[in-house]
Image (tube, rainbow, N blue to C red):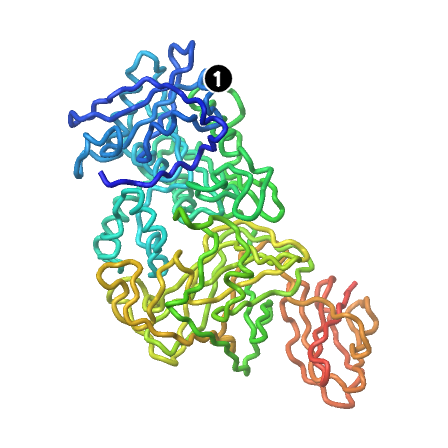
Amino acid sequence: MKKISFLFPTLLLSSFAFSQLTPIVYLIPMRDGKKIAADVYIPSGCTQCPTILIQTPYKRTNYHLGLPLGIKLNINSSNYIFVITDWRGFYGSAAAAYSGSPTTGQDGYDVVQWIAGQPWSNGKVGTWGPSALGRVQFLTAKENPPNLTCIVPQVAGPQENYADYFPNGDYRTEYAEQLDGLGFGISPILLANPVHNNLWTFIEKQNYYPDSIRVPAFMIGGWYDHTIELMLPFFNAIRTQSAPSVQNQHRLLMGPWVHGGHGAAYVGSATAGQLSYTNSAGWSDSLAMLFFDHHLRGITNNWNNSPYVQYYQMGDNLWQSSSTWPPSGLTNYKLYFHPDTSMDLTAPAASSTHSLSYNYDPTDPSPTLGGSTIRLDLNQGPYDQDSAVESRNDVLKFTSAVLVQDVVMKGNAVVHLSVSSNRKDTDFDVRLTDVYPDGRSMLVNDGTCRMRFRKGFTAADTAVMIPGTTYTCDITLPNTSITFKTGHKIRVDITSSNYPRFNRNANNGGVMYPGNNGDSLVNPVIATNTIYMDDLIKNSYISMPLTANPPLAIQESAEDEMNPDVYPNPTTGKFFVVAPEKGLQSFDVYTMLGEKIISSTPISPGEQPWAIDLSAQPKGIYFLKCKTENKGAVVKKIVVI
């Protein structure tokens, strides 16, 4: 067996290192005659109790230092028996190594049914565990063991798909390296199949089976976890495609958590990266126990009336609930990028021609700092991008005005870029950040696009870039739930690397992974990459799913002698504008939501005062954006009563 690193994301055990639990050790027979090693923890006085099964490739004996779900060393306080097994081929089950069949899910079936036949079991078995320990629960449930009652997979989905390893065609370097370090040895297969081919079609079909789930599932995830885009679609699928008897028994919990595995942050912790969410601590454990109590012990605890989806709204730092994800009542608003590096709801003028460029050097890539990483030497979660990323000269930072009201986002933001390069291939990497009043630019999430895959992900889809030609790419960011608070700003960083989270592009248009090396650079060249902000066709923006209050791109300018006079204000509809001495050149009128309702009306000298009539518009607040000869744009708030 290949030596693997220790990944144990659920226990913080330093205070318990002086003592440990002593389980009963079993060798459980499998259908092929080989045996799986198991540790069984039975509370004193338990004659026939329900069982929580944990199946791990990360060494079952580590749980001698404490059990999850808040039990730690206090097994006698538990209402559950715990059975923890080593996967076939790993550690105590190394002698049961095999190739192909039986599958991990079939082993799970055999373990569940073995548990149900033991004198200490009441016949009800639930499963629990994060990451790989979560995925094996889906595989076990797929086999439909009769005594499997419910499952609690954390930060895991059952799918294996191309996009998870090659988002927008770009290899997830650190992810694959960590999986190799854990003994899965997956990178040779990935690097031999860097495009979507028949192998990926087969794998994706085999690993997507919502209609095979016949037991209630309580799925738990984190907004800074890398499995979000596996979990959320699968939860939605089992709500409509699993066995009809359990469709309404599935639940989802999404907290402000990282994947875990190292460091102080994990699923259910109060900290994530450089931020703290104290009222999120312990929710995953406490709700999982309510779920188990309801399904395994028959306790009347109102679990069956709990919301289908409970999620943490970061920024507001509050738990919220919904019947679906994403919640209803969202509207997509576009924040357009402008050549002065601002971004707002105003689309570029049709006659404008603007772009910004930067150089990307593959030998000096923009570094990964936080985010949905898992490699042991990388930070996880929200980290300030200001010094390590945004201070470099290979980044464009597009930033909103200071927010004059909270901006509430739930779901997937999409960054649309109009781009060109002087090279045959390159990447575009984006980071969405929440800029605090003190200047911290805290990472929300990120995404990437490899330009040779702009048309699709099969070999036939790939195409080199023609230097100087303009192309588009859309980068869908992972789901999140965050409120950008009043006084903050919203920022999008655009670079051409995010390393080692994603593979660094050599820019030469040649073989992506020479020698099947996922982190090699052969003949790298510096690329000059350009972002366009021209007109309504060739523009760049971020589309954000927001609740009723979008970001106000416009706010009233500070009063000074150059501002135009507006009267009457408030008005019943009609008002007049008197320009300062140098005169007005044009004006636009916007709703409070940033929607332009009167567009770029030119004003000739001597036409003052200028009459504007909003009588046909609903009552409310409007903004008059005026362009003057020597002041630029100034903004006046108009109140229609």
Say whether residue 569 is left or right of residue 446: right
Q: Quadrant of the image for the C terminus?
A: bottom right
Say whether residue 307 is left or right of residue 510: right
The answer to whether 239 is drawn above or below residue 464 in the figure is: above
**Figure label count:** 1
**x then y, percent, for residue 154:** 42, 37
The answer to whether 139 is drawn above or below residue 485 in the figure is: above
Q: Secondary structure at mark 1?
A: helix
The answer to whether 59 is drawn above or below residue 234 in the figure is: above
**x then y, percent, for residue 636:** 75, 71
Q: Work out whether residue 513 or residue 468 is closer to the camera in this orientation and state it.
A: 513
The residue at the far bottom in this view is 605
Identify residue for label 1: 77
Q: Quadrant of the image for the N terminus?
A: top left
The residue at the far front in this view is 18
Mark 1 residue crowding within 10 angstroms, few (<14) / some (14–19) / many (20+): few
The answer to whether 411 is drawn above or below residue 130 in the figure is: below
**x then y, percent, for residue 510:** 26, 70
Q: In percent of the image, x 55 and y 82: which residue is there?
A: 352
**x then y, percent, for residue 614:** 73, 70
> Which residue type does callout 1 highlight?
Ser
Say whether residue 162 is left or right of residue 394: left
Residue 90: quarter of image: top left
